[in-house]
Image (spheres, helix red, strand yellow):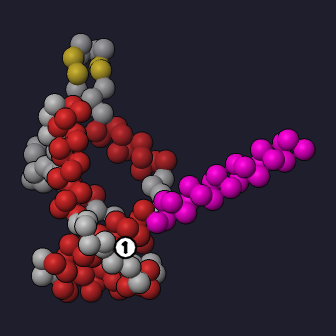
């Protein structure tokens, strides 16, 4: 009987985690939508509403009065600087160097948005960004 309770608890925990994840994704989209609208990107905001998986979820919610995307970013910067004694880096130059791909080359197509990357995609990304030690050259690549 305890194994049944353990399975039930695991199932409920997973359901709660999935609910929190979907609410977090919705909140991010609502924050982005509010930011776009407040800065005059009306066509982009309209496109976001139409391209979101459920149009009603974005139009049913709005940002709370005491929060916006820039405030969240600033508070995270302050927290990160206090904890790690340096400012976080949110963006980098997207110019191609030595024929390498840029960050814009990796923007997923519409069908890929929201899907979990495949194991092969993750391993390629990991290999591209890793600084593996190469014992033959006795230095980091």
Q: Residue 109's x, y, as percent?
A: 35, 69
Q: What residue lies at 20% left-to-right and 72% top-to-bottom?
A: 35
Which residue is located at x 37 percent, y 73 percent?
A: 110
Please tell me in which quadrant of the rendered image residue 50 appears: bottom left
- Residue 123 on the magenta segment: no
* Residue 51 in sight from this viewpoint: no
- Frontmost residue, 53 versus 68: 68
The image quarter containing residue 51 is bottom left
Residue situated furthest front in the rendering: 66
**In the rendered view, would you say 131 is above or below 113?**
above
Q: Nearer the viewer, residue 63 or 135?
A: 63
Measuring from the top left, give residue 66's x and y in whole percent.
25, 67
Q: Which residues are magenta?
A: 1-23
Q: Is residue 5 magenta?
A: yes
The residue pinned by badge 1 equals: 110
Residue 137: image location, x then y, percent:
23, 16
Q: Main secondary structure of the magenta part?
A: helix
For image coordinates 30% across by 14% down, the residue present is 135
* Between 88 and 112, the one nearer to me in the picture: 88
Q: Is residue 31 left or right of residue 85?
A: right
């Amino acid at each position: 009987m305890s194994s049944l309770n353990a399975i039930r608890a695991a199932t409920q925990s997973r359901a709660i985690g999935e609910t929190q994840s979907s609410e977090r994704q919705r909140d991010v989209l609502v924050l982005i939508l509010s930011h776009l609208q407040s800065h005059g990107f009306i066509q982009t905001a309209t496109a976001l509403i139409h391209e979101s998986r459920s149009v009603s979820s974005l139009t049913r919610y709005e940002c709370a009065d005491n929060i916006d995307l820039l405030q969240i970013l600033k508070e995270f910067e302050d927290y990160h600087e206090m904890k790690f004694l340096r400012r976080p880096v949110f963006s980098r130059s997207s110019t191609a160097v030595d024929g390498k791909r840029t960050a814009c080359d990796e923007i997923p197509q519409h069908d890929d948005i929201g899907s979990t990357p495949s194991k092969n995609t993750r391993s390629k990304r990991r290999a591209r960004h890793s600084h593996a030690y190469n014992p033959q050259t006795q230095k980091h690549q």
